[in-house]
Amino acid sequence: MSVHAQSSNAFVPIVGDDKLLGGVRNGNWIPEEKAYRFVKGGEKYRFYTLSGLAQTQIGGKAEAADEPGRNGYYISSFMPTLSKKDKSYGKTTVGVACSWNPQMRQPRLEDTRQQVYLDAVVAVLKAHGLPHAKPHIRSIVRVDLDGTGTDSVVIDAISPDEYGNTGNLAVHANSYSFILLRTVVHGKLKNTVVNGAFYKRPLVFEAGSKDSIWNVEQHKLLAILDLNGDGVLEMVTNEIYYEGWGFTIYRVADGKVTKILEGGDGV
């Protein structure tokens, strides 16, 4: 059921930090390359993490990137910066300039040490050829995605050393990073890898090699929000690779995951 209080003709921009990802108009998802022309400036954005509302800011117009290594469109006049007193300080945020509450059902963060979810991670690792990888979960979120009263669980799993804690420059054998959705479809539990990367071998710095760090990806769950006002929550992830990054918005319907919008930058 729609909770849309905004005019159907109004454009609703969606951003990852200050990067325009696209938006919604007349019930349709509009990609970045078309959405920029609808951003007039003066829109009030609310920025979220998994923990909830982080801050609000007024944005300017969408402007084409004019710096080396930057592509696409950015919102001028702001760059989301959280207070150092905020527990989300330093984290990437997802912003939307809408009139409804995009987080009407608050995601609940759960204990990452629960064995049932560690076992689910092990099953995914085995299915992707990493039977000896140690399971490690960065975050677990429980939320009712579609408002039916049935919770889904989203797991953000990554190697215990998180790629050596050096971004994508230290990838060892049996490394991985993926987002796993566990949802009930017609009374049965369904596990779906939303996105992910799995590395059986250590990687080397070698341009053109399939085992080079140029090809390493890290995936992270950023927020779960209703971005088009229809009462259904979308998942937003952040992708990081060598000298680049991106955001992806996914929608879930009857257990099927569909990529809705994406945008990023890098060389």
Image: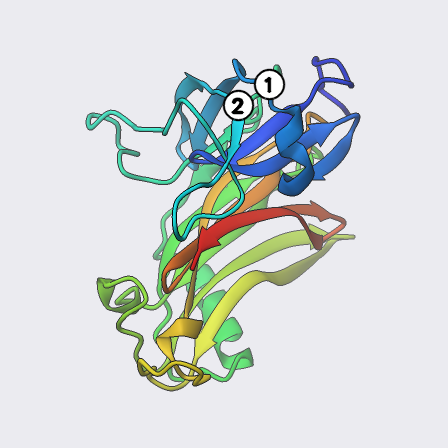
Question: Disc 2 and disc 1: Cα gap in Å?
Answer: 5 Å
Q: Considering only vertical position in the picture, is 116 above or below 264?
A: below
Res. 249 in view: no
- Which residue is disc 1 drawn over? 40
Label 2 close to label 1 by CB (< 8 Å): yes
Locate the C terminus and report the quarter of the image it occupies: bottom left
Q: Position of residue 16 (x, y in %)?
A: 47, 38
Instruction: Decide which of 200, 189 is in the foreground and name it.
Output: 200
Residue name at image x 29 percent, y 62 percent:
167
Q: In this view, does 30 lie to the left or right of 106?
A: right
18 relative to 8, above or below: below
Residue under the point 59% across and 48% down: 262
In the rendered view, would you say 184 is above or below 4? below
x, y percent for residue 144: 61, 37
Q: Which colouring convention does the figure follow? A: rainbow
At label 1, counting other C-alpha atoms closer than 10 Å, the crowd grade (few under 14, some 14-19, many 20 or more) is: few
Image location of residue 30, percent across then percent down:
71, 37
Residue 169, position as x, y percentages in the image: 27, 70
Q: Which amino acid does label 1 sit on?
A: Lys
- Tag 2: residue type? Lys
User: Toward which corner of the image does residue 138 lie, by quadrant?
Assistant: bottom left
Q: Height in image: 143 above or below 119?
A: above
In the rendered structure, the answer to whether residue 206 lies left or right of residue 144 reads: left
Secondary structure under the numbered disc 1 in the rendered image: loop
Q: Residue at x 62, y 37 (%)?
A: 22
Q: In which quarter of the image is residue 7?
A: top right
Q: Mark 2 points at which residue?
A: 61
> Which one is nearer the viewer's eye here, 113 or 98?
98
Describe the element under mark 2 as helix, strand or loop. Answer: loop
**For this rendering, which residue is in front, 48 or 207?**
207
Quadrant position of the N terminus in the picture? top right
Residue 196, numbered label:
none
